[in-house]
Amino acid sequence: MGEKIGLIPLVCPQCDTALPAGLDEAAWVCGQCGQGLALDEEKGLLPVQVFYQTGIPEGKAGLPYWVVDGSVQVERQVYGGKNESQAASLFWAQPRRFFIPAYTCALETLASLGPRLLLNPPAFQPGAPVRFMPITILRRDLVAIAEIITLAIEADRKDKLKQIRLKIDLSEHVLWILKD
């Protein structure tokens, strides 16, 4: 007939503290024990590692990013002329680290910020916990966003791209709270 609707209690499974969840939020850090938790619509709350970058100014909210290593296979077709397919294959031959904004941002921001962070990753120096922007991007959307980032990088090549096929496999993800 119809799908069953289930409720997922937003309570830390480690210390039984209620999570103060806002509308559209997808992950949290328990205010009592510091456990990172992400919402999985099928499995409920799952633990997730959360790290904080040093140097986030006091009183300023950090920006959450899903950080995940990914292997990318690219098949490109171009219109006549210069063809950068070999350069693309070489670039994607090794796994790449994706920095996927875990907060709501415009598509244009995602298409410029994601490639910039993939090409020039920030330093990972863990620091103390700080407050951060709400995490609104679900884990299930990470592959689709990684595709957007990959397409933005490929569209920036200096050939006349006609068609592209992507296959992206992502490893386990963690959350990093970064300074802007």
Image (cartoon, rainbow, N blue to C red):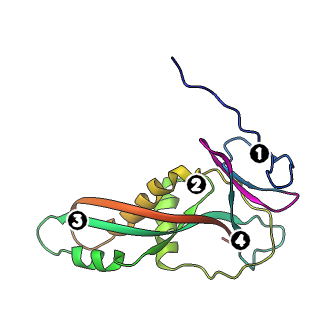
Q: Measure the C-alpha gap from mark 4 to mark 2.
A: 21 Å
Could you tell me residue 18's position as x and y percent? 85, 46
Q: Measure the C-alpha gap from mark 3 to mark 2.
A: 28 Å
Describe residue 99's horizontal placement relative to residue 36 as left or right.
Answer: left
Q: Residue at x 82, y 62 (%)?
A: 34
Q: Residue at x 23, y 65 (%)?
A: 76
Asked whether the residues under the numbered discs 4 and 2 touch, taking CB atoms below 8 Å apart as contact, a structural biologist would say no
Q: Measure the C-alpha gap from mark 3 to mark 4.
A: 36 Å
Could you tell me residue 179's position as x and y percent? 69, 72
Tell me the tag on residue 76: 3
Asked whether the residues under the numbered discs 1 and 3 touch, taking CB atoms below 8 Å apart as contact, a structural biologist would say no
Say whether disc 3 or disc 2 marks the residue closer to the N-terminus.
Answer: 3
Discs 3/2, front: 3
Q: Which residue is mark 1?
A: 21
Discs 3/4, front: 4
Secondary element at image label 2: loop
Secondary element at image label 1: loop
Q: Which residue is mark 4?
A: 51
Q: Which residue is mark 2?
A: 105
Nearest the viewer among 21 and 173 is: 173
Describe residue 97's horizontal placement relative to residue 25 as left or right.
Answer: left
Say whether disc 3 or disc 4 marks the residue closer to the N-terminus.
Answer: 4
Mark 2 residue type: Cys
**Range of residues picked out in magenta:** 31-45
Discs 4/2, front: 4
Q: Residue furthest left?
A: 80
| In the image, residue 26 above or below residue 130 | above
